[in-house]
Image (spheres, rainbow, N blue to C red):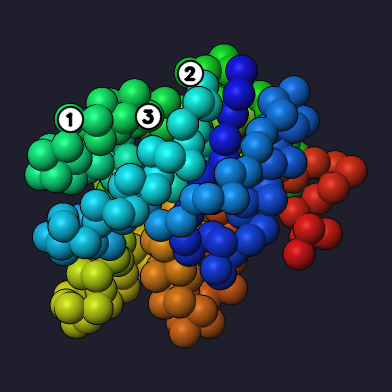
Amino acid sequence: MRVALMVTCINDALFPDVGRAVVVLLRRLGVDVEFPQQQTCCGQPMVNTGYLDEAMPLVRNFVGAFAGYDAVVTPSGSCAGCARHQHALVARRAGDADLVTAVTDTSCKVYELSEFLVDVLGVTDVGAYFPHEVTYHPTCHSLRMLGVGDRPRRLLQAARGLTLRELPEAEQCCGFGGTFAVKNPDTSVAMGSDKARHVRATGAEVLVAGDSSCLTHVGGLLSRQRSGVRTVHLAEVLASTEDVPWRSQR
């Protein structure tokens, strides 16, 4: 199986350890993951704000970069959702039959990390060791667009040493929403503050999610509140072992 890593813009620019964690994890599970150098943004920021024409070059590049792979794995529910569902909108608008075909062939092979682990590899115990009290936030796109369900929770529950605490109102949006946070800052902060309050109520040491963007938003609020709660991406938790704990990867 030829597997590619779709690292996403935010991880490439701000959180490279997340991408590294995916590679470490998949290689530990016997998957020789590749990193196509041609990849750039998936086009989600443009699509979400209605700029479909501006997203067309990025969609064309995406299908070219990931052509020929059996699976494309990404540590992001939002970017996986864009590739799986929104690229088709852009391709149809372009009126290009070849692009429509290429998108159809590629989009069905894109998996959010927990989907790939549970559904494709058939594992929930990935050998992780993470001796911390954790609460999990199911991000909007992974929850509603992809329907990942309890896959991330099953992976976390199988990690040795990890205590999973229930997050009140877990399915509520954190308020980030990409450009929504920029265009509607007051509403965004209010929603994020509710999420931070619920996180603190769990008594957990660590907030885990499958999207770095949501962790950035809620993590910023938790930091300003001096809560002591850290934010860690799901991939980093699952890549952590007794021999290579998460802290030593920083």
Amino acid identity at mark 3:
Thr
* Residue farthest along the right direction in this orientation: 243
Q: Secondary structure at mark 1?
A: helix
Amino acid identity at mark 1:
Ala
Alpha carbons under labels 2 and 1: distance apart? 31 Å
Numbered tag placed on residue 106 in the rendering: 3
Q: Please report whichever mark, 3 or 2, sits nearer to the chain's N-terminal start.
A: 3
Question: For this rendering, which residue is in front, 167 or 54?
Answer: 54
Numbered tag placed on residue 97 in the rendering: 1
Question: From the viewer's perspective, is residue 145 above or below residue 133?
Answer: above
* Residue farthest along the top direction in this orientation: 122
Q: Nearer the viewer, mark 2 or mark 1?
A: 1
Q: Residue at x 33, y 53 (%)?
A: 58
Note whether residue 139 is visible: no
Label 3: few (<14), some or many (≥20) within 10 Å? many
Q: How many marks?
A: 3
Question: For this rendering, which residue is in front, 127 or 42?
Answer: 42
24 displayed left or right of 197: right
